[in-house]
Image: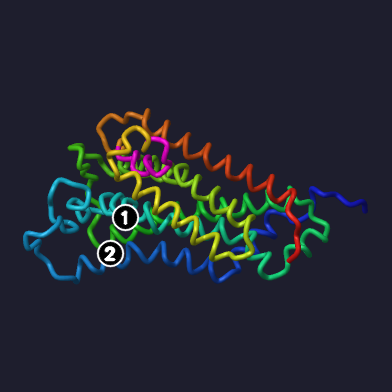
Amino acid sequence: MSYLPSKTLPYRIELYRQLKRKRTAIAYLFVVSLPVLVAIAVKFGPSGNSGGPTRLGSGTTDLIGLATIGASNFTVTMLYFATPFLLVTVIALFNGDTVASEASWSTLRYLLASPVPRARLLIQKVKVSLSLSALAVLIMPISSWIVGAIAFGTKSLQSPLGATFPNLVAVSRIAIITLYIGVSLTFIAGLAFYLSVRTDAPLGAVGVAVAISILLSILDTITALGDLRAWLPVHYSFSWFDALATSIDYSVMIRGGSYCFMVGVVFYALAINRFAHKDITS
């Protein structure tokens, strides 16, 4: 049988390899644990606001104050909590670890010697890392809704923008929010993957990607930067709030999502170009 480059390193094989790794199970466990821990803390923790910052489920009209009304409100609040750090870290882990770990284990050159073409190796890893990332983003609202339903019931979604949505509409709004979050985090996925190609240290690639995201978030809070903040991908992290209005204005979400997606694609292209000319020594 003749050699076919397109048959090397099938997607299902690479996906199976990554799913078997402990870091994958631990990452998903962290995603599921957030709503569980928050629900336990709210149900069994001390009550009362004591004049301090808004308490989760305190009944105020902001997102956090409405969190314990029902499963839908709890889910939206968990997405708010998870977006800036937990999901960023998990996605950076799946994308920043994928190539660098092979290099650190000295298995990368053996994969290429199989022989797996460099471009195909990278594309297959991109497909698998994005699949794992999409699953992590999807698990967050699903697990949050289940936990919220058990702990707080299934009442209608009350938006901090003044709207109330029945459960069917609420689920559709949560789906829109989840889709936007997944697209907006493409930039951190591309950045982490590019760093994974640049280094043989998996934790270095993941750590730098998360650190850059945190740095950009800090810069985004500096109002003195003015319109320059619109060039920061993290500036659009919470544009999904528009999905909680009675009538959705998609303009900001489309602009933010497409910008983050394009930044991610640029980083993936840089990674492929870098890997094509990289001297594989490990």
* Disc on res. 81: 1
Q: Nearer the viewer, residue 52 or 78?
A: 52
Q: Which residue is mark 2?
A: 38
Q: Earlier in the sequence, mark 2 or mark 1?
A: 2
What type of secondary structure mainly makes up the magenta span? helix
Q: Is residue 269 magenta?
A: no
Quadrant of res 171 = top left
Stretch of the chain drawn in magenta: 230-241
Relative to 138, residue 109 above or below: below
Residue 205 x, y percent position in the rendering: 55, 59
Dot 2 alpha-carbon crowd within 10 angstroms: few under 14, some 14 to 19, many 20 or more: some
Count the marks: how many?
2
Residue 149 x, y percent position in the rendering: 28, 58
Q: CA distance from mark 2 to mark 1?
A: 10 Å
Quadrant of res 128 = bottom right
Q: Residue at x 50, y 54 (%)?
A: 135
Q: Nearer the viewer, residue 202 or 223?
A: 223
Element under label 2?
helix
Q: Residue at x 42, y 36 (%)?
A: 231
Dot 1 alpha-carbon crowd within 10 angstroms: few under 14, some 14 to 19, many 20 or more: some
The quarter in which the C terminus is drawn is bottom right
Q: Nearer the viewer, mark 2 or mark 1?
A: 1
Q: Residue at x 41, y 62 (%)?
A: 31
Relative to 12, residue 276 above or below: above
Q: Are marks 2 and 1 in contact (CB under 8 Å)?
A: yes
Element under label 1?
helix
Q: Relative to 226, is 58 on the left or the right? A: left
Q: Amino acid at mark 1?
A: Phe
Q: Amino acid at mark 2?
A: Val
* Disc on res. 173: none
Residue 274 x, y percent position in the rendering: 68, 48
Q: Residue at x 69, y 45 (%)?
A: 273
